[in-house]
Image (cartoon, coloured by chain):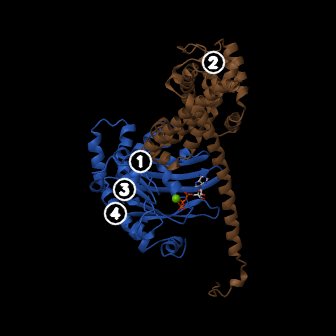
Amino acid sequence: MQNSNYLYNSNILEVKNLNVWYRAFQALKEISLSIPRHHVIACIGPSGCGKSTFLRCFNRMNDLIPGTRISGQVLLDGQDIYNSGVDPTEIRTHIGMVFQKPNPFPKSIFDNVAFGLRINGFKGNIKEAVESSLRRAALWDEVKDRLNKSALTLSGGQQQRLCIARAIAIQPAVILMDEPCSALDPVATLKIEDLIAILKEEYTIVIVTHNIQQAARVSDYTAFFTMADDRSGILVEFGKTNEIFSNPKDKRTEDYITGRFG
Amino acid sequence: MTFNTLNYSKMYNRRIAMRKGIGDAFYSLFLLSVLVGIIGLITLLVQVLTEGIPWLSWRFITSFPSRHPQEAGIFSALMGTIWLMGLTAVFTVPIGVGAAIYLEEYAPKNWLTRLIELNIANLASVPSIIYGLLGLTIFVGWMALGRSILAGALTLSLLVMPIVILASREAIKALPLTYREAAYALGATRWQVTKSVVVPAALPGILTGVILAMSRAIGEAAPVIAISALVYLTFIPTSPLDRFTVMPIQIFNWISRPQNEFRGLAAAGIIVLLIILLSMNALAIFLRNRYQVRTEV
Ligand SMILES: Nc1ncnc2c1ncn2[C@@H]1O[C@H](COP(=O)(O)OP(=O)(O)OP(=O)(O)O)[C@@H](O)[C@H]1O
Ligand SMILES: [Mg+2]
């Protein structure tokens, strides 16, 4: 095993004893895991087991839902993002998010990518930053002649890559993706998966997916969640993806990935 | 014709012909209602046009009212209306849109805000003369603004404010949550989300509401009669504290006169009012399309 110092450096995110409630309902119970830097972490599990809730804990999007309560710690580079002095707005500049349904703003393609730069007071060359983000999102060649056209003229797959470009434009350390391909056809899905493989060189990616093959293809680590008897979400197993898929330790994991459940 | 493909078709009593008959009956009924409305409107328009067009001229638009029909015009009322609308817009738009943004984006959802929302919805249906009397008491009386354009504009602002607030709130509410989420997830503050995402996307709807409200205000006679009570005005208002009259009052006055010529003048006044109204609605449609083109295609 590595010494603790190495662990501290290699894990960009650490979750300790995380509990989440929506009013009286406990959606997540006692979740603990560590997310290593520059890897892809897949979260899988049956519908309603709290995967989206878990993901939204990292950028404090749950703060926007009235009645949400949280206990435990989420450490970003060793610092608890739920400390009283921490501004969720700042956390969201370090931890970006891509949503299930492509959701570009009803603005031009350029303005979509520039949005995060502008609101965060970016001082550099906006044009260059937009171009490089679009290139990294593998979208530049398709849109370079129509940057001033509305983003809503793009296809669903292009829109989702635009959303990825928009998220990486502000240089986050982590990108959260909540079922980013569920609204896309197989070809567009493949493009996003290729992109994820490239992006993990620079970013840490946490992705929720219902597609078990996709989890196996794109991720280095897999977290399997399920529902306890009281319907609250629990983490069953977390580990290297090839180990989880070839040799699951828990019966529930095995049933899920072999398709006998959910 | 009967198909025998399904051997369990006896379990249904489909009555397709009867269902279609009911549909056709309602279709005819609705078509008839539309026709009644359109025919009524056309009759009105034809009557106003035939009576009014002979009186419509540049002289009519640029003359002050007079006892002699041949010399009478609508100039002071037209200018009064323009003044009144301008000032009303100045008061209504920022306050109405601001209130809508507050209620949708900032206000906590509790019994107090629900009470406020209910009140705004009810205010939109209060008869306009009530607003006139309210304005007479508060603006003309207590605030000692006199029977001025300012007092009239403040009164009309109260009258149409609920329309602007309701329309703007609907426009804001119609925005999908996903836009807001996307902006928050990029590190936007609440004000940045409002300013850069919510308001631009809701703008077409907000504009429509504003113009609707203005169209309502421009045709109101009752509250303005309560405030201004003037018909013969032989000067053009030059400041918000001047006295004034507006087109609906002038038209009303002409209609109530015994001589036939004045009815022609009234019809000509109605035509001018209609032209202004139609232009405002055209502007609303133009602005809405323009922004929708910019945002959607
Ligand atoms: N805003 C909310 N208020 C109350 N309960 C909520 C809210 N959002 C989610 N829940 C509940 O929390 C539980 C977890 O929901 P969550 O959306 O995290 O599940 P999920 O694993 O992402 O499901 P899916 O795979 O269908 O997306 C569910 O039981 C859900 O009903
Ligand atoms: Mg989900």
Q: Position of residue B276 (x, y in %)?
A: 53, 32
Dot 3: chain letter: A
Position of B258 with respect to A130 (left or right) is right
Rendered residue at 62%/44% (across/down): B42
* Residue toward you, B259 or A123: B259
Label 4 environment density (alpha carbons within 10 Å; few <14, some 14–19, many ≥20): some
Can the viewer see residue B141?
yes
| Numbered disc in front, either 1 or 2 | 2
Q: Which residue corresponds to mark 1? A: A95
Q: Which residue corresponds to mark 3? A: A161
Q: Are marks 1 and 2 in contact (CB under 8 Å)?
A: no
Rendered residue at 71%/76% (across/down): B15
Query: Which comes sooner in the sequence, label 3 or label 1?
Result: 1
Whether callout 1 and callout 4 share a subunit is answered: yes
| B207 is higher (above) or lower (below) than B185 | above
Of all chains in the rendering, the one displayed in brown is B
Q: Label 4, label 2: how many angstroms apart (C-alpha)?
A: 64 Å
| Numbered disc in front, either 3 or 2 | 2
Q: Tell me the element at label 4.
A: helix
The colour one sees for chain A in the rendered image is blue
Labels in figure, total: 4
Rendered residue at 44%/38% (across/down): B196
Position of B65 with respect to A217 (left or right) is right
Q: Label 4, label 3: how many angstroms apart (C-alpha)?
A: 9 Å
Label ID, residue A61: none
